[in-house]
Amino acid sequence: MKFVLQRVLEAQVDVDGKTVGQIGNGYLLLMGVSQTDTREIADKMIEKVARLRIFKDENEKTNLSIDQVDGEILVVSQFTLYADCKKGNRPNFLNAGGAALAEELYEYVLERCEGLFKNTEHGIFGAEMKVSLVNDGPFTIVLDSDEILQ
């Protein structure tokens, strides 16, 4: 599982010209699922996101977690995080999880986030989405379960 986590001042996702998810201060989380991902892996990834201390404290040090700043989260599925560009100029997505697995884990992550964060918003699985954000910092982290769970 791969997450691209961006600390944002605001973010939103639109589908067919309509805003379907919108947050203020918090995280935009782009989520990719591989063929071998499980709920247990998703749990560990979400726990890592919840514990990360990348918000500024009163001394301008990145020392606070999302709950300490009353932050929100916007979760967007993005299978292209598993693009393989090693050969040729056209990426392949053979390492991405199939649609059924990816959607099941996406829905599971949303459910877990709703229990952990002040406000959880999301995109629509499989839809053509337009995502906009104001990145705070900018501060962007890539979390890969292959590295985190070693």
Image (spheres, rainbow, N blue to C red):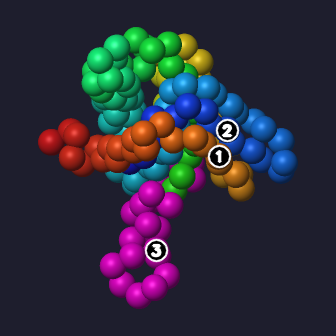
Of tags 3 and 2, the one toward the viewer is 2
Q: Which disc is residue 12 wearing?
A: 2
Instruction: Determine the residue positioned at 15% across, 42% down.
Output: 150
Q: CA distance from mark 3 to mark 1?
A: 26 Å
Of 136 and 41, nearer the camera is 136
Q: Is residue 64 visible?
A: no
Look at 34% across and 33% down and name the residue there: 45
Is the residue under label 1 in contact with that under label 2 (CB below 8 Å)? Answer: yes
Q: Say above or below: 64 vs 121.
A: above
Image: magenta residue range: 80-107
> Residue at coordinates 40% horizontally, 12% vertically from top-left?
68
The residue wearing badge 1 is 132
Of the residues shown, which amino acid type is indicated by label 1? Answer: Ser
* Amino acid at circle 2: Gln
**Are there few (<14), some (14-19), or many (20+) residues within 10 Å of tag 3?**
some
Query: How far across and how far down the image is residue 149, in percent?
Result: 21, 39
Whether residue 89 is in magenta: the answer is: yes
Disc 3/disc 2 C-alpha distance (Å): 28 Å
Q: Classify residue 91 as left or right of residue 120.
A: left
Question: Which image quadrant for residue 119?
Answer: top right
Mark 3, residue position = 92
In this view, the residue in front, 19 or 44, is 19
Is 81 placed above or below 43 here? below
